[in-house]
Image: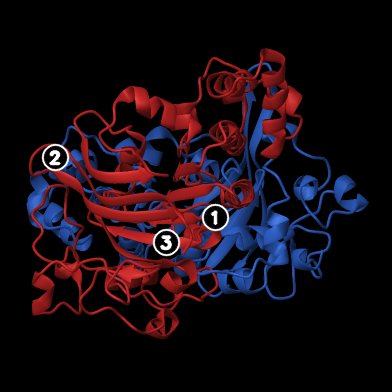
Chain colours: A red, B blue
Amino acid sequence: MTEQLLEARDLRVDFGPGREAVRGVDLTVARGETVALVGESGCGKSLSALALMDLLPPGARATGSALLGGTELIGRDERVMRRVRGNRIGMIFQDPMSALNPTTAVGAQIAEVLAIHTSMRRPARRRRALELLESVGIPDPAVRAKQMPHELSGGMRQRVMISIALAGEPELLIADEPTTALDVTVQAQVLALLRERTRDTALLFITHDMGVVAEIADRVAVMYAGSVVETGPVAQVLESPRHPYTSALLRSVPDPDRPATGDLPTIPGQVPSVGEHIEGCPFRPRCGNATEECLTAPALVGEAGVIGPSAVACWNPRTDLLSEAIR
Amino acid sequence: MTGQDLVVAEGLVKRYDVRGRGTLTAVDGVDLRIEKGTTLALVGESGCGKSTTGRLLLALERLSAGRVTIGGESIHDLGKRELRTLRRKMQPVFQDPYDSINGRLTVERIIAEPLRVHRFDGDLAGKVGELLDAVNLAPALARRFPHELSGGQRQRVAIARAIALDPEFVVCDEPVSALDVSVQAQVVNLLRGLQSERGLTYLFISHDLALVRYLAQRTAVMYLGRIVEEGPTERVFADPRHPYTQLLLAAAPRPRVREHDKVAATVRSIGELPSPLSRPSGCAFSSRCPLATDRCHEETPVLRVLDDGRSAACHYAETAEVGAA
């Protein structure tokens, strides 16, 4: 069994009593592994990631446990977490403009990160900043280093963010929808770059896009209504999803390789809102196969009754191949 | 073409003066025809001019050159009052309904607004109820405000408002891009349903090729202000002839693990869209095209009809295969 770098157990985020948004997330990321945390808006995937970095919005509170190489991340004071962020966890967000300083040249911003996280001297930092820009595929790094963030394209800005996130040589990189705002051609390039640059770094990749999951992930964790409902190796989850939600979600994704026949399959009903009381399985009201059992919440369990490499939180998991279900 | 073309655009040009940096040609000689009751998809990367083209087709922006006719009327030559009357027949639906609906009005008033403006004299409440029903929204939502709705519900409100005056032509500019996939599927199905019930004609602007395959009879691919390929959607998807179309299709993510093929590898090496202010000479795509020859850097290819009723603007359209490069 590979060593787990990140181990979250019963991670919860609430906005006050009875307003729970993350309702007990179990998640592991091994060293060097890329795990995609996938789900629709409001499922709690971004809040889970923010909880790991202690960057929750005001009014939100995290409970439960998340160990990073044995260090507890939940409930620690800001002094500890400031050392963890950047040094041990790097971060990339959807909009690099929200993370970059708009009035400082990008090269100086990378050098600044190096000043905080390394003992390099100024000339070495400057050299290293150019190397980092080059390593993320930015042409003419010496020219680009002097430019302001707004002078770069969205794809270039995201490359700069990746170089900053990796500057401190973190053990874990958390990327929250880093390619959502990019064109498909640029997205493909940024995903390839992330794959290549995180070969030895664990990556927790948060996305709503099953197509992106297929491109980047070794393993997938599917979230619904604040908890993980299914996890497993990427090919297994995409080809033979066991949770009815995963299966329904995958079927509603249009496929550019398949000629259109009739309407796109949809999922009836709506996602429960934050704080809404959930009795039993959260997907029960929308599930076609719900039974009496589903009034009791199913635990996320694998084959032998434990969370192994794959697990599902369902009393009646599917056993068919998705391609057969579509036909 | 079997049916009648409702929308005909000829030689559309839109230039903007960029202070101190010259002229930006966002749309550079675009011809389009949309048959009544069908959907034409316009696809391409951001900045290719697809949204500007959509706005020109609705006369929301002035043309620098060219002509747009809708049902035979040349809309850019109409006076203000005539254009206002014609606006009933053509409506936009944008990506973010927040930009196009007034957040301080109730759903009921948002949907009734165009009816009031065009002096609808029937049963207003009844008509609003009908429209809510047409977009599958519960009547109880009529008294809600936009911020109380989900993204999918807001987009349905925007669609209800767009169809309130029984338009013939609707420009949908990335209407589902901001929605979750399961909700996106519902809105796409709604747009298809409304088209078949009401005979609507759509221009569907999107960066999402997979969706296009579900919605559009014909597809036009745009690159730096020009159409580089146009044809029946199934032909364009099954056998794209322009290298740019081939790369766009290869770049679209699929919800399954793929063998990392050659075309996908090529996508990773083509870089980003050049600035429309510094358009490459010859073929505009030549600076990124893995198949480009000397001829491509010098001679601009024209959009020419291939033998299967499709058009492509590539010197080597008959044989171009990016995967074989």
Q: Indicate the secondary structure of the residue bearing disc 2.
A: loop
- Say what amino acid the circle numbered 1 marks: Leu
- Say what amino acid the circle numbered 2 marks: Thr
Q: Give the number of callouts.
A: 3
Residue extending furthest toward the right: B294
In this orientation, which residue lies closer to the viewer: A185 or A307? Answer: A307
Residue A73: image quadrant is: top left
Query: Could you say where residue A7 lies in the image, as x and y percent from the top left?
Result: 36, 51
Q: What residue did someone put label 1 on?
A: B42
| Alpha carbon distance from label 2 to label 3 | 41 Å
Mark 3 crowd level (few <14, some 14–19, many ≥20, 10 Å Cα): many
Query: Could you say where residue B94 lies in the image, as x and y percent from the top left?
Result: 38, 45
- The answer to whether marks 2 and 3 sit on the same chain is no
Horizontal side of residue B214 vs B232, given as left or right: left
The answer to whether any part of residue A103 appears in the image is yes
Residue B147: image quadrant is: top left
Rendered view: A207 above or below A286: above
Q: What residue did someone put label 2 on?
A: B106
**Dot 2 and dot 1 residues touching (CB under 8 Å):** no
